Amino acid sequence: EVQLLESGGGLARPGGSLRLSCTASGFSFSSSLMSWIRQSPGRGLEWVSTLSGGGESTTYAESVKGRFTVSRDNFNSMFYLHVNNLRAEDTAVYHCAKAEYYYGSGSFYFDQWGQGTLVTVSS
Amino acid sequence: DIQMTQSPSSLSASVGDRVTITCRASQSVATHLNWYQQKPGKAPQVLIYKATILQSGVPSRFSGSGYGTDFTLTISSLQPEDFATYFCQQSFYSLQNTFGRGTKLEI
């Protein structure tokens, strides 16, 4: 059974930092595309970033580029989101998700999600 | 930026009803359109990907159709466990992966 368990959320001050973690199990982690997606009442579901299985290819949403960094530890099946220079609008539940490519395409969909970890940015 | 517009934003229906939810993209996404279901306090789950392909394990009462800018998710006969919020998501523009704002399906 695929499991994705996020941790590391909490209350942070504007301008602050956090490291979110995702513990993965039940699938071939090192060959899997992994993503972070956040969800808030105000902004809905918002894709944040995607990282290839080997870690060689990364994409970010414009809203977080330069402030957030994704990384992974394939030996321990861990996926991370380093969030820096936090803003109030970054307040959200952050989900990690496994992504699958459409056959023969560079497009992908999110086939497994974790329940998320809440990040609240407030002074 | 590409925008995904779902309608209706909420919908009341009864068990056994046939329900259709629509999703419109502001630019063509070909068939790069996915549908998700989310129940309160739970993570989203994929139902349909690439506009029409049913994810493994998803009941056959769910179906998807469409191409370009207009897409539909149909539930042929509502079951009690189908009352949830449904989201569409485009994956044509992979640097955006935009989601719709959701359709809440209520009893």
Image (cartoon, rainbow, N blue to C red):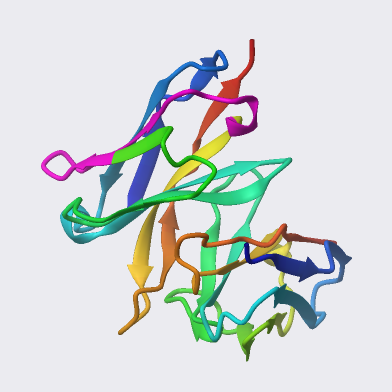
Return the x and y of residue A73 as percentages of the image width and height.
17, 40
Quadrant (top left/top right/bottom left/bottom right) for the N terminus of chain A: bottom left
Q: Is residue A1 visible?
A: no
In the figure, B25 relative to A78: above or below? below
Instruction: Report the side of A65 relative to B90 (left or right).
Output: left
* Residue at far left of view: A75
At x 70%, y 73%, the residue is B26
Boundaries of the magenta span: A71-90
Return the x and y of residue B68 as percentages of the image width and height.
62, 87
Return the x and y of residue A115 as percentages of the image width and height.
49, 42
Q: Nearer the viewer, residue B91 or A61?
A: A61
Return the x and y of residue A89 as percentages of the image width and height.
64, 32
Quadrant of the image occupied by residue A90 = top right
* Residue at far right of view: B12
Quadrant of the image occupied by residue B70 = bottom right
In the figure, B3 relative to B44: above or below? below
Quadrant (top left/top right/bottom left/bottom right) for the C terminus of chain A: top right
* Numbered circles on residues, count: 0
Instruction: Report the side of A96 relative to B15 (left or right).
Output: left
Q: Nearer the viewer, residue B42 or B25?
A: B25
In the figure, B98 relative to B67: above or below? above
Quadrant of the image occupied by residue A18 = top left
Instruction: Report if residue A92 lies within the magenta region.
Output: no
Instruction: Report if residue A75 lies within the magenta region.
Output: yes
At x 21%, y 56%, the residue is A53
At x 44%, y 42%, the residue is A65
Instruction: Report the side of A112 relative to A116 (left or right).
Output: left
Q: Is residue B22 visible?
A: yes
In the figure, A55 relative to B69: above or below? above
